[in-house]
């Protein structure tokens, strides 16, 4: 089984692309603190496609804390010198917002939310929701 769940903050704004066939996708990077050693941070490259890419582009920006669920795939290529490379990427299937605000502070989605709905979720609460 190839499943991964990560919670962290975006290191930069997502970058949007399209394939030659017109399929939309975006790439972004997530900084994830280690569970046992809070002083260590791992950085993951992520790719979201089509509908998920649209949500990322509209509501996610540098510094935003999110939870992603997906799978790992390896991007293999050979450079112009004939050297083979292998790079892991997380393909995002599901995205969850882990903080209480969207990219824009004046977002109609948040404008009617109560203070309780706006609060920041704890890691335990997020994991509990994911496991339901």
Image (cartoon, rainbow, N blue to C red):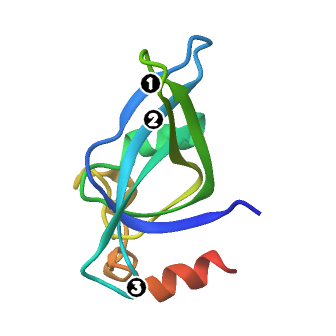
Q: CA distance from mark 2 to mark 3?
A: 27 Å
Q: Answer left or right for 71 relative to 65.
A: right
Of all residues, the one furthest to the front in this rendering is: 82
Residue 64 at what x, y percent from top left?
30, 59
Secondary structure at numbered mark 3: loop
Q: Answer left or right for 92 relative to 43.
A: right
Asked whether 113 or 65 is in front, the reply is 65
Q: CA distance from mark 1 to mark 3?
A: 33 Å
Task: Sort mark 3 into few (<14), some (14-19) or many (20+) by Cα contacts within 10 Å.
Answer: few
Write down the quadrant of residue 38 in the picture. Answer: bottom left
Asked whether 77 or 8 is in front, the reply is 77
Q: CA distance from mark 1 to mark 2?
A: 6 Å
Secondary structure at numbered mark 1: strand
Measuring 41% from the left and 84% from the top, which residue is drawn there?
35
Measuring 32% from the left and 56% from the top, which residue is drawn there?
102
Secondary structure at numbered mark 2: strand
Write down the quadrant of residue 42 in the picture. Answer: bottom left
Task: Sort mark 1 into few (<14), some (14-19) or many (20+) by Cα contacts within 10 Å.
Answer: some
Lower position in the chain sequence, tag 1 or tag 3: 1
Residue 128 at what x, y percent from top left?
59, 85
The mark closer to the camera, 2 or 3, is 2
Lower position in the chain sequence, tag 2 or tag 3: 2
Residue 17 at what x, y percent from top left?
44, 24
Label placed on residue 17: 1
Q: Is residue 128 above or below residue 92?
A: below
Contact (Cβ within 8 Å) of mark 1 with mark 2: yes
Residue 88 at what x, y percent from top left?
52, 47
Of the 4 image quadrants, the one containing the C terminus is bottom right
Q: Which residue is the site of mark 2?
A: 26
Q: Which residue is the site of mark 3?
A: 122
Q: Is residue 83 above or below residue 112?
A: above
């Amino acid at each position: 089984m190839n499943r991964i769940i990560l919670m962290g903050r975006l290191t930069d704004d997502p970058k949007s692309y399209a394939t030659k066939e017109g399929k939309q996708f975006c790439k972004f990077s997530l900084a994830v603190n280690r569970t046992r050693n809070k002083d260590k941070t791992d950085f993951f490259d992520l790719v979201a496609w089509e509908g998920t890419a649209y949500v990322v582009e509209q509501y996610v920006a540098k510094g935003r804390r999110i939870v992603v669920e997906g799978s790992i795939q390896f991007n293999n290529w050979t450079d112009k010198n004939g050297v083979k490379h292998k790079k892991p990427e997380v393909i995002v299937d599901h995205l969850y917002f882990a903080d209480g605000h969207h990219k824009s502070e004046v977002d109609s989605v948040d404008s009617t939310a109560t203070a309780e709905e706006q609060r920041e979720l704890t890691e335990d609460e997020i994991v509990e929701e994911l496991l339901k």
